[in-house]
Image (cartoon, helix red, strand yellow):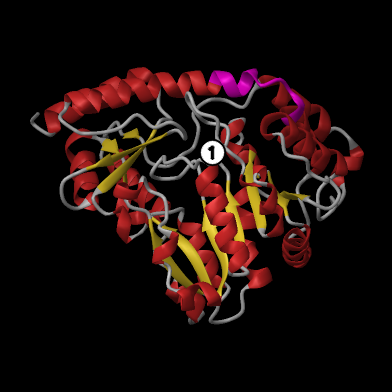
Amino acid sequence: MELSNRLKALPPYLFAELDEMKRKKVLEGVDVIDFGVGDPDLPTPRHIVEEMQRAVEKEENHKYPSYEGKLEFREAVAEFYGRRKKVDLNPETQVIALIGSKEGIAHLPLAFVNPGDVVLVPDPGYPVYYSSAILAEGRPYKVPLKEENEFLPDLESIPDEVARKAKIFFLNYPNNPTTAVAEMEFIKECVDFCIDNDIILAHDAAYSEIAFDYRPKSFLEYEDAFECTIEFGSLSKTYNMTGWRIGYAVGNEEIIKGLLKVKTNVDSGVFQAIQDAAIVALRGDDSVIEENNRVYKERRDVLVEGLRKLGFEVEKPKATFYVWLRVNGSSIEFAKNLLDKAGVLVTPGVGFGEYGEGYVRFALTRSVERIKEALERMESALNV
């Protein structure tokens, strides 16, 4: 049986390849220290788990959920935005539940992209932006994120004819993998660009609460953003709930409505017990977020200082739980060499796009002790 042209056009999924590289080393008996996939090692907070246990027992949660999500969940998201971002949302029309933000990002082009339409994707960037455009038979147009521009897109470099054909512009700040952050002046420029060119601005805010001495901005804090913006949020990183698969989309009512129409045809909503647990998470105090950030900040400092001692030039990220490291030569060769010689797994930057070449990404999802051990191994392997 032959795969569709859409699937043939997809590049290999980076994290699946990393899993295979790691699996082979583990089978060889290597103790791999894995800084690859951004999956928090911190447990889901106990009060959220306990609410899930109670919610599973409720018979009303054993039935089909609503497509858009329980109203109480959507209200909790709106309250969260009001508390953390000072953004007012109508929970009935401007919020929907997602089976993780990845699901919503992947489905958005199916709602608005016709064959041949352009989708603007950051490079380097989360691979799903590119693949979602391909699956909708759109044409991804890579917008470079370069170090000399603080890993922000140069909007003026996008040709007018490309902008006119574009339907969606994916952005992600705080940024994965570069850790770059967006200030309000840049947000306004992006929103105005999308309004002028009749483009949907799809902002992936998965790392919106992981920050150090910096307050990440919602793109919806700029009032005009509601004209063109949908923002994707996730409980995965904020509350250590990657395996729970729950997120949300907020913003422009018509864009939300279009995404919801896709979802009604391809899924049956989020298990209501998970929504109940998510409500408790979103309505809880912010000590969970603060404690996560304290842990990641300590790990960041240890890793960055250690890398500097090894001779690397690296900035301390203001946000996300990643460190984006410039290396000499091929990022794949660097990553393979590090895995082979030190048993340390990092993500080659080229896996996020051609402009990620020359960098590798570390995820701060290992303890301080393991970070120190990895640095010691690296010192021996790299002959520093």
Name the residue nearer the viewer: 178 or 310.
Answer: 178
Q: Which residues are magenta?
A: 282-291
Q: Quadrant of residue 37?
A: top left
Picture residue at 29% right of the left edge, 48% below the top: 148
Q: Is residue 94 left or right of residue 190?
A: right
Magenta-span inclusion, residue 103: no
- Secondary structure under tag 1 reads loop
Relative to 84, say whether 162 is above or below.
below
Crowdedness near tag 1: few (<14), some (14–19) or many (≥20) residues, C-alpha within 10 Å: many
Question: Which quadrant: the C terminus?
Answer: top left
Quickly name the residue at label 1.
207
Look at 46% across and 44% down and name the residue there.
175
Could you say which is closer to the camera, residue 224 or residue 212? 224
Give the number of callouts: 1
The answer to whether residue 121 shows anywhere in this view is: yes
Residue 62 is left or right of residue 325, and the answer is: right
